[in-house]
Image (cartoon, helix red, strand yellow):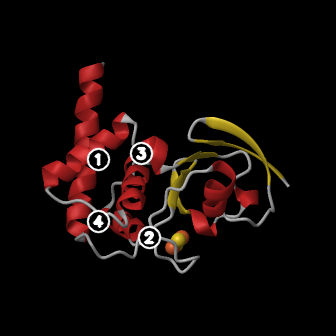
Amino acid sequence: MRVECIVDGKTLSLSLNSNKPLSLILADDIGIDTFSSCCSGNGCGNCIALVDGNAVLSCMVPAFEINGKTIITFESFKKTRNYQDIAKAYDAVKARPCPICYKSRTLLFESIIARGVTKEDEIMRELGTIECACMDALDEIRIIREAIEIRRRRRVRRS
Ligand code: FES
């Protein structure tokens, strides 16, 4: 099938098997080798990309589901001010993800922040997307709240 999508700001038209997972599309068809590990669908959570702003496990999203969607990988996200907000929050809280889950967890935090998810039980549920046990959940919530505040202050300064 033909799939039209935007990946990291580039408009693409790709000829794909409709069931090919997004993780493989990114690696094979677009040349974005962004993931530090791959469990091939067993739920490690280390393959997160943003699809229309939602954090998804890219190894479980088939090609037909990305048609017409906007996809952001860590490769472009790391160049943004929004990434800097989260990186500053890591420093402020003195906690950060390990190298294995860093990219996915950072994109997951961004999804939570940008979608305005603020209820603690909802945040906790979303944080469960990533299996890696390198972080304390309370630290993760502090990072999210800190990044929200850093972003709010940045936007007030700009206006
Ligand atoms: S690679 Fe482990 S959940 Fe996708």
Identify the element where label 3 is drawn.
helix
Q: Position of residue 115 (x, y in %)?
A: 44, 48
Q: Nearer the viewer, residue 110 or 145?
A: 110
Q: For mark 1, what is the residue?
A: 86
Disc with the residue nearer the chain's start (4 vs 2): 4
Q: Give the x, y percent position of residue 53.
A: 52, 48
In the rendered image, which residue does mark 4 sit on? 98
Query: Which of the two discs, 2 and 3, labels the residue nearer the N terminus?
Result: 3
Q: In which quadrant of the rendered view does residue 65 lie?
A: bottom right
The residue depicted at 64 percent of the width and 60 percent of the height is 22
CA separation, marks 3 and 4? 23 Å
Pointer 1 or 3: first along the chain? 1
Residue type, mark 4 in image: Cys
Where does residue 69 sit, x and y in percent of width and height?
Answer: 66, 46
What whole-number distance in Å separates the C-alpha atoms at marks 2 and 3? 17 Å
Distance of label 1 from label 4 (alpha carbons):
15 Å
Dot 1 amino acid type: Ile
- How crowded pointer 3 is (Cα within 10 Å; few <14, some 14-19, many 20+) is rated as few
Residue type highlighted by circle 2: Thr
> Which residue in the protein does label 3 denote?
114
- Residue 129, which numbered label? 2
